[in-house]
Image (tube, grey):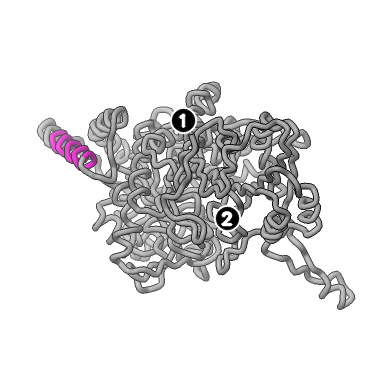
């Protein structure tokens, strides 16, 4: 089928286009400068103006290239450009079945992009290169880079020696940046993420998370958000976006129109945000408006029901009222709209993949991310055109947008990355500096009833560090305890891991192997808690550090069973206790009160070291809560220490 004709602009028409583009540039810059939620300062301001000024010429060239490519594609090939597949970033041999499967999908189905997940930096770069070579048209590659490129690009641990294999630069979770209140750090986080991610062959960062996490029972977002205050989320999110996009990566604001005030896990079921339209306008939508004003190039959808926007009970991802009427028409977003993963129950429910795909296109989505079957998804788009459910022009609009993004990323000239250059750009010292500063400034001392922090410089003191973490988390407590041990050589370290208890008594009673009933909430075994109490009683200070994420029991927010018993036992013995949360910021609301409570906002090495240094008085403590922890601390709370 013949595609649209490519109309080259005449000199007079080119002049009109250039003049209009220049006027638009000035308008965008003026709006960004005038907006109280998206401040532009210093170097960031200069780079922002330079980047915006370059857009019109690049866009014209990109549009011409996109039109020329679009004219060569069949409807099925166009549909395939909208479908992105998931792949690990792990090392695989060229003949490994897992690699051959994904390579064959890219080559034979002519997919338009991919989302790459965990792996070492060089392995991810090699994998993206291999997939680019397999693709007929260059691929647009995305990745969830919420804490920087290290959110996906880390080398892991070598067993049984427990040797850390290194990786990209890791910042704290976004809520840690919220605790700093520092837009410059948010910008640096975006900058470093973009520079490292592009070196790996990733062009679109699925970040920042702009959900306003004002519900402590949220099982999905939590520390991934900048906080509960929409103005704070808007300021930090816009700065992150400018930092990322000024350095060559497309940013993606997620999850529109807001995943913060829900108690359901959208991976498992349809989430629900049951608030008024006025509340949505003043809270949930505010960060996304700031993102659009900052020029964000991508938006990712939310698999949730918002009755104030659509009364049909449809997931926002599949709702034209939300994605077209609100986001595109009312809010003026013209960029790339990416569905959240289409394999999630929150969007699928009882629906077929084909039906979900067609609804996503009707709603206005450009990228159909991670369908359960890419062939079915591609055919569903073709069938949608042939049946008249939507037009070929509708598909063309999405594909042209994606092709223009590929041109902007330079993929029409060079689609692979230099593997030799990865080590000169990823995880380098220059990038570690802002990440280290962010980790230090994020540390928050919520309260300190007895003035235990900073800890007294007494090498002979008996200090016990108890780490509560999943058994598979080899990094938990290692750097934290090593830093503490530099001040307390006799430091005693204990590790407790929750266990999943299976009960097959019903089957045994019936005389067979039985069906195991698995407790969904892992617990510390009573014997291990009692052993820890026997060792820790009488210590000068006991530090209980948790690397456990948010509880799945959102009805009661019950903490890991056994931890309350541990804290109560220590308090009953008169032992001074410092509670440190490295992962779940709301941890303390379900626990007996400790004598001091510290939140680190990240379990990664940089945050472990920063937290220990702050507790030892080697670094100041300046973080302030970007959330309210019911019964523990109010928004803005935080004890400072020099």
Q: Nearer the viewer, residue 186 or 346?
A: 186
Q: Which residues are magenta?
A: 18-33
Q: Nearer the viewer, residue 183 or 566?
A: 566
Is 31 placed above or below 379 here?
above
The picture quadrant where one finds residue 30 is top left
Task: Check disc 2 and report its element: helix, strand or loop.
Answer: helix
Residue at 12% from the left image edge and 32% from the top image edge? 15
Secondary structure mostly seen in magenta is helix
Q: Which mark is residue 203?
A: none
Q: Position of residue 83 (x, y in %)?
A: 46, 50
Mark 1 surroundings within 10 Å by alpha-carbon count, few (fewer than 14), some (14 through 19), many (20 or more): some
- C-alpha distance separating marks 2 and 1: 27 Å
**Residue 497: in magenta span:** no
Corner quadrant of residue 236: top left
Q: Which residue is denoted by mark 1 in the rendering?
A: 434
Q: Which mark is residue 587?
A: 2
Extreme residue toward the left, this view: 12
Q: Is residue 189 visible?
A: yes
Helix, strand or loop for disc 1: helix
Residue neighbourhood size for the residue with mark 2, other residues' Cα within 10 Å, grouped as few (<14), some (14–19), many (≥20): many
User: Does the image show residue 250?
Assistant: no
Query: In the shown orientation, is residue 544 left or right of residue 405?
Result: right
Nearer the observer: mark 2 or 1; the answer is 2
Find residue 74 and report its horizontal and vertical position in percent.
39, 49
Q: Is residue 520 left or right of residue 294?
A: right
Q: Residue at x 33, y 58 (%)?
A: 283
Q: Position of residue 605 (x, y in %)?
A: 60, 36
Closer to us: 474 or 149: 474
Identify the residue shown where x is 46% and y is 30%.
434
Image coordinates for residue 97, horizontal then vertical, percent: 67, 43
């Amino acid at each position: 089928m013949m595609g649209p004709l490519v109309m080259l602009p005449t000199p007079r028409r080119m002049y009109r286009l250039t003049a209009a583009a220049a006027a638009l540039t000035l308008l965008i810059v003026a709006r960004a400068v005038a907006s109280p939620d998206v401040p532009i300062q210093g170097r960031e301001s200069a780079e922002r103006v330079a980047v915006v000024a370059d857009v019109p010429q690049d866009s014209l060239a990109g549009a011409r290239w996109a039109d020329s490519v679009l004219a060569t594609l069949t409807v099925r090939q166009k549909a395939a450009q909208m479908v992105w597949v998931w792949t690990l970033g792990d090392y695989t041999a060229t003949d490994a079945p897992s690699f051959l499967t994904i390579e064959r999908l890219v080559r034979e189905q002519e997919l338009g992009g991919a989302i790459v997940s965990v792996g070492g930096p060089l392995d991810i770069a090699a994998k993206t290169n291999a997939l680019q070579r397999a693709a007929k048209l260059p691929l647009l590659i995305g990745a969830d880079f919420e804490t920087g490129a290290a959110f996906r690009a880390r080398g892991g641990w070598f067993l049984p020696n427990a040797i850390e294999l290194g990786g990209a630069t890791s910042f704290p979770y976004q809520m840690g940046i919220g605790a700093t209140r520092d837009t410059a750090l948010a910008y640096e986080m975006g900058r470093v993420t973009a520079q490292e991610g592009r070196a790996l062959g990733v062009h679109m960062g699925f970040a920042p998370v702009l959900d306003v996490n004002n519900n402590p029972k949220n099982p999905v977002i939590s520390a991934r958000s900048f906080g509960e205050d929409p103005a704070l989320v808007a300021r930090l999110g816009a700065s992150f976006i400018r930092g990322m996009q000024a350095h060559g990566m497309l940013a993606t604001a997620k999850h529109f129109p807001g995943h913060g005030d829900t108690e359901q896990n959208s991976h498992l079921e349809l989430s629900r945000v049951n608030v008024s339209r006025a509340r949505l306008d003043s809270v949930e939508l505010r960060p996304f408006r700031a993102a659009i004003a900052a020029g964000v190039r991508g938006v990712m959808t939310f698999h949730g029901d918002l009755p104030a926007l659509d009364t049909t009970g449809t997931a926002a991802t599949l709702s034209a009222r939300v994605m077209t009427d609100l986001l595109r028409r009312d809010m003026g977003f013209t960029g790339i709209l990416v569905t959240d993963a289409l394999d999630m129950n929150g969007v699928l429910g009882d629906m077929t993949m084909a039906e979900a795909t067609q609804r996503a296109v009707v709603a206005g989505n450009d990228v159909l991310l991670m369908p359960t079957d890419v062939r079915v998804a591609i055919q569903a788009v073709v069938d949608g055109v042939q049946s008249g459910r939507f037009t070929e022009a509708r598909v063309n609009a999405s594909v042209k947008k994606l092709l223009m993004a590929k041109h902007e990323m330079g993929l029409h000239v060079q689609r692979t990355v230099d593997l030799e250059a990865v080590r000169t750009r990823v995880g380098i010292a220059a990038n570690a500096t802002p990440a280290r500063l962010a980790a230090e400034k994020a540390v928050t001392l919520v309260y300190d009833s007895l003035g235990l922090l900073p800890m007294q410089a007494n090498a002979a003191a008996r200090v016990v560090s108890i780490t509560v973490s999943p058994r598979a988390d080899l990094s938990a407590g290692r750097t934290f305890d090593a830093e503490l041990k530099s001040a307390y050589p006799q430091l005693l370290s204990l590790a407790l891991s929750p266990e999943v208890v299976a009960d097959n008594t019903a089957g045994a009673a019936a005389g067979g192997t039985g069906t195991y009933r698995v407790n969904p909430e892992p617990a510390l075994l009573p014997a291990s808690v009692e052993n820890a109490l026997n060792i820790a009683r009488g210590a000068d200070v006991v530090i209980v550090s948790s690397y456990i994420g948010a509880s799945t029991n959102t009805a009661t927010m019950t903490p890991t069973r056994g931890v309350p018993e541990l804290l109560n036992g220590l308090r009953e013995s008169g032992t001074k206790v410092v509670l440190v949360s490295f992962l779940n910021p709301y941890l303390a609301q379900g626990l007996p009160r400790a004598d001091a409570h510290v939140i680190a906002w990240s379990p990664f090495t940089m945050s472990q070291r920063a937290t220990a240094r702050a507790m030892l008085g080697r670094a100041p403590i300046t973080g302030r809560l970007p959330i309210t922890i019911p019964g523990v601390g109010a928004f803005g709370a935080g004890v400072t220490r020099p």
